[in-house]
Image (spheres, grey):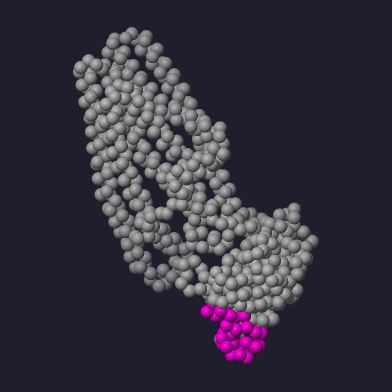
Amino acid sequence: MNNASEEYQRKYTTRENLRFLLRGFWQLDKKQMLLSLTQLFPRILLPLFSLLLSRLFIDCIVNHRSARELIVATLLFILVFGVLRILEKHLEVSTTLLGVKRRHQYYIDRFDKLVTIRYDVLESPNGRKLTKNSEQFIRSENGGARAFWDHFRVLLLDLLGIAGYSAIIGAVQPWLIVVVLAITILIFWLGQLDNRQQVNKYRQISTNYLKHIYLQRTLRELTAGKDVRLFGMRPWFTAKRHDVSEERFAIDRQYGRKFTVYETLTAVLVAVRDLTAYLVFIAQVLQGRMSPADFVFCIGLVMGFSNWTLNIQEKMRYLDHDLRECDEFRQFLDLPDTQLCDAPPDQSLAPCRVSFDHVHFSYPNAKVPVLKDVTFTVEPGEHIALVGVNGAGKTTCMKLLCGLYLPDQGEIRIDGKKTSDYRPGELLQRFSALFQEYVSLPVSVAQNVSMLPEAETDQARVRFCLQQARLLEKIEQLPDGLETLLDKTLSENAIDLSGGERQRLLLARALYKSAPIILLDEPTAALDPLAEQEMYLRYHEMTHNRTAFYISHRLASTRFCDRILLLEHGRIAECGTHQQLIDAHGSYAKMFEVQSRYYREQEEA
């Protein structure tokens, strides 16, 4: 509950967020925005004309006007009423289109931001939270980007209605409007208290709902379904569901009493205001200073005024929610960017010399650093294996080298130049990386190799790289050859490659870029040990003239490397060739012996 009730920290004021949203609509389409605002006038005039029509009927009946006058007046009002209604509906189309167009533009802004946002920021807890919440701002049908303009216009409508009706009531009875406005201010103050409680309740319910969704999703997943049944976990889920339900009931009970008090006080104030108006107008009728028709008209004005003031509370709550989501969206847009490498690969770059000089690094909110005083140098063209247990910092080293992370202390140099001194695009030109989680685009095989638009893809080079990766024969047997689409999620005519074929495609991609530094972070983890070793040997053969880093938990796969660096407790604990580390009888030798014994037992079995 503590987290649920935690106060949301806004970066921008309400006025700044309101100005940001309004400026966005104005820049998108000034004409439609103005047309949309003109819809407010028919909405204000329609109820006013209804009151005038009622006044006219009563006046005609009381004063015994002719039927002809009554019919003409009625037809005139019906005509005006119909024109206003048609105009309102016509302008509503502009309002809807404007909201849809603005939301689409926000989708584009968010997409462009996701492409350029700095990787370490995107991966951070705050970056993930803002990324998720920024999507809610766009996708929500009842709030955020889509509904803001509707909520803002209706709020303007309420304010204009209050102003217009106040002016008419004040002209009829000046001191009465003072009483009405005073009571309205009290109602507004109660509404603000109610709004705050609604926001607090929403936060707590949102946290409770996430727990409910977790339980539902877990039971729905097939993987969890096996454990639930095999290990008899039903009592745990049943008890947890009961706890979540009780938590929700407690929230409803807690705020239900407060809302009852607010609603009761509001109803009393509304009753006092209406009763005061009735008494004043009845007294004027009895004194002969007001006709029955004017009485009906003025009472209608007070009732209309009451509706405007009651509606404004709800619209302000909606608008506050929209502005809060906007604030999160703006914080997402404010996250720092990095320059991406959009230029074609520079194939003239020579193998690089890489050095880590007393590098330290910690993840946000982590109590223990991942890397502590890491220092090593890799010569141009040298092949290095980074090994160690899970969490030793192997992948972190590679992300620091690419510039995806920034070191807390120390320096990383490529050819003697600090990575922080490179332009991001210039730095990324020097790397070709193969990770365990690879990216396969729903485009042709050729584009998946080049990672470039079709017009910029060198088909001959693609063919050569596929041949080097021993995948060309397989691709040429397909009906569409290099133009065969991958990823069946978007095309029924696409194909899915096997695990080994995907690894060869990744190798061809790395060869196509021809970067001077190759990073291989367990790209073959899904393969069996023998297939992994064969693939690594293939990588080694194809990248003999480049600086290469290999990461693998299977130590036998990296025996061919020039040197092996063992990361332990955030430091380089051992360094040497495979045989040197075996002869040293240290941690590497023990790890290798354990794995070797396991594979020997497997073979004997």
Q: Quadrant of residue 537?
A: bottom right
Left or right relative to 305: residue 415: right
* Residue 566 visible: yes
Residue 572 part of the magenta-drawn span: yes
Q: Is residue 192 left or right of residue 520?
A: left
Q: Residue at x 48, y 26 (%)?
A: 87
Q: Which residues are magenta?
A: 565-592
Tally of numbered tags: 0
Q: Vertically, is 497 above or below 287?
A: below
In this picture, is 96 found above or below 591?
above
Identify which residue, 220 or 371, lies in the foreground.
371
In front here: 85 or 106?
Answer: 106
What residue is drawn where x is 36% and y is 41%?
314
- Where does residue 323 sit, x and y in percent of width and height? 45, 46
Q: Is residue 543 in view from this perspective?
A: no
Q: Is residue 229 left or right of residue 110?
A: left
Q: Is residue 182 magenta?
A: no
Q: Position of residue 262 (x, y in %)?
A: 27, 44
Give the quarter of the figure containing the C terminus: bottom right
Give the image quarter of residue 192: top left
Identify which residue is drawn at 73% across, 66% down.
514
Q: Position of residue 412 (x, y in %)?
A: 63, 71
Query: Furthest residue to the right?
Result: 460
